[in-house]
Amino acid sequence: MTASKGQVVTIRYTLHVDNELIDQGELDYLHGHRNIVQGLEEALEGKAAGERVVVSVSPEKGYGLYDPEGVQVLERDAFPADAELVEGAMFYAEDSQGNPMPFTVLNVDGKEVTIDFNHALAGETLQFDVTLTAIRPATPEELEHGHAHSLHGHHHQ
Ligand code: ZN
């Protein structure tokens, strides 16, 4: 069995950016449903359990290019009164379709709050070192939800 659309793939991974370790761990994802960044999913396509994949993913196929227009200045009043506005805090806005749009607080200056909709890894080349540890067919429920339901449990937002 190999990683292909509709399979739940378990991977152990490390992620480096500029030779600095950013993230590591193990996760299940549903292949072919964009649960993971595009460039990594493409590199894992057709690979079998036990195989190791070392791949460098461009920003275009990772977390996107850095968009200067993603940085915006809002009035303090645009936030709930009890919101803790500190540098690095993350919040969610909604787009016109109601999709969550995460953003990060960059700076708070009096009544003005500078925020950034760019992903923290936007514009970065991602260096993945991945070992596929298991592959199984997804359950009908997983296919319906578009994500895997196993390993470390599952939380719906
Ligand atoms: Zn689910």
Image (cartoon, rainbow, N blue to C red):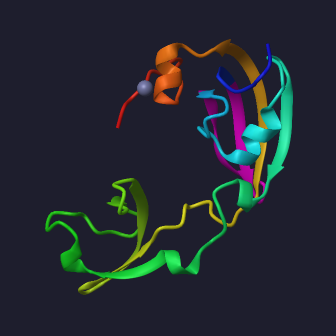
Of residue 71 and residue 12, the one placed in the foreground of this image is 71
In this picture, which residue range is highlighted in magenta?
Answer: 11-28
Of residue 37 and residue 144, the one placed in the foreground of this image is 144
**In magenta segment, residue 63:** no
- Quadrant (top left, top right, bottom left, bottom right) of the N terminus: top right
SS majority, magenta = strand
Residue 75 vs 45, above or below: the answer is: below
Q: Position of residue 14 (x, y in %)?
A: 71, 39
Q: Position of residue 39 (x, y in %)?
A: 75, 47
Q: Residue at x 85, y 28 (%)?
A: 52
**In magenta segment, residue 14:** yes
Using residue 46 as the reference point, say whether residue 85 is left or right of it. left
Q: Residue at x 66, y 22 (%)?
A: 10
Residue 21 vs 150, above or below: the answer is: below
Residue 80 vs 145, above or below: the answer is: below
Q: Quadrant of residue 46?
A: top right
Query: Residue lying farthest left?
Result: 81
Q: Residue at x 21, y 63 (%)?
A: 83
Q: Residue at x 38, y 54 (%)?
A: 100
Q: Is residue 27 visible?
A: no
Number of numbered labels in the structure image? 0
Residue 81 vs 46, above or below: the answer is: below
Using residue 146 as the reference point, say whether residue 43 is left or right of it. right
Using residue 106 as the reference point, say whether residue 61 is left or right of it. right
Q: Is residue 22 visible?
A: yes
Q: Quadrant of ligand 1?
A: top left
Using residue 49 as the reference point, say whether residue 152 is left or right of it. left
Q: Position of residue 30 (x, y in %)?
A: 61, 27
- Quadrant (top left, top right, bottom left, bottom right) of the C terminus: top left
